[in-house]
Amino acid sequence: MILLLDIGNTNTHVGVANSRRVISHANIPTGELLVGKAAKAISKVLKDRKLEAAAISSVVPRATGPASSLLKAHWAITPFILTSETVSRVGIVYPKPQTIGPDRLANAVAARVHFGAPVVVVDFGTAVTFDVVDRDGNYVGGIIAPGLAAMTGYLHEKTALLPRIEIREPRGIVGKSTEQAMLVGAVHGYRGLIKELIARLKSHLKTRALPVVATGGYASLMAKGVPEITAVDPLLTLEGLRIVQSDQKT
């Protein structure tokens, strides 16, 4: 079995995969990795499966070392670390490849393998990120915009009368309360942003047919009103990490 760690600023997505797919996953606080206390939580995800390899995608450099040390100490495994230099399945045409988040590279790999090229990944996290693979299979860059929760949270923090809201599907297009009005602006407005950016990417890539794969916390919600999104895969990052790690054997 392969252990996969997608280390984010707040949480680390832990996955267990075989040679074909991710078979189980869970989130643990990234802080547990930083203080060396994640072994128990990782063991719960592994259960009694025999661990043969591990791979790490990390956007928290100070957590990468402790995570590697933990895997070596508890499972005698030296993990594969995904970077712009170790990535496979996609080329990189980008001025400073080392500045690309490893999670974005993992997304690009999984999308390229499963949906072909060109392809776009939209990751709905703290920020919403677009990652673009051109028709030659090269990662060529992306787009970053504020995430839904960040946007609505900012409105709450900077105004006296706007509440903190839970993101969900609005009941209509005209809000009948402050909360409903904020939901309409957030969800329908954000869908408009996504549609416009996809349209511009199609023009830039000179293609009418463009697979667009959504992942991240709000992917399913946003995809309901954006037919341009052709697939939703919440495990896309882990799948990309699995693919690249598997390539190390060949």
Image (cartoon, rainbow, N blue to C red):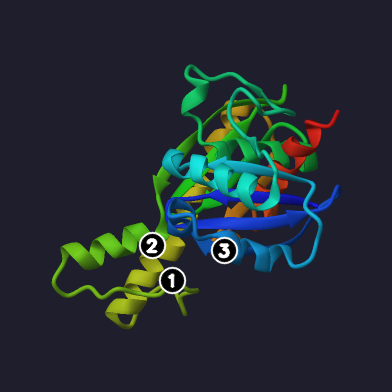
Q: Residue 89's spot in the image, x, y percent?
A: 74, 29
Q: Cα distance, mark 1 to mark 3?
A: 20 Å
- Dot 3 surroundings within 10 Å: few (below 14), some, or many (20 or more)? some
Q: Nearer the viewer, mark 2 or mark 3?
A: 3
Q: Residue farthest to the left?
A: 160
Q: Residue 69's spot in the image, x, y percent?
A: 56, 44
Query: Label 2 sits on what residue type?
Result: Ala
Report helix, strand or loop for mark 2. Answer: helix
Question: Between 205 and 98, which is closer to the camera in this rendering?
Answer: 98
Where residue 26 is drawn, which disc sits there? none
Query: Label 3 sits on what residue type?
Result: Asn
Give the residue at mark 3: 27
Quadrant the C terminus occupies: top right
Picture quadrant where residue 248 is located: top right
Q: Are marks 1 and 2 in contact (CB under 8 Å)?
A: yes
* First of labels 1, 3 by sequence position: 3
Residue 130 shows in the view: yes
Which residue is at 51% across, 36% downward? 101
Where residue 149 is drawn, which disc sits there? 2
Give the residue at mark 1: 167
Specify whether 109 is left or right of 203.
right
Query: Label 1 sits on what residue type?
Result: Ile
Q: Residue 167's spot in the image, x, y percent?
A: 43, 71
Q: Cα distance, mark 2 to mark 3?
A: 19 Å
- Dot 1 surroundings within 10 Å: few (below 14), some, or many (20 or more)? some
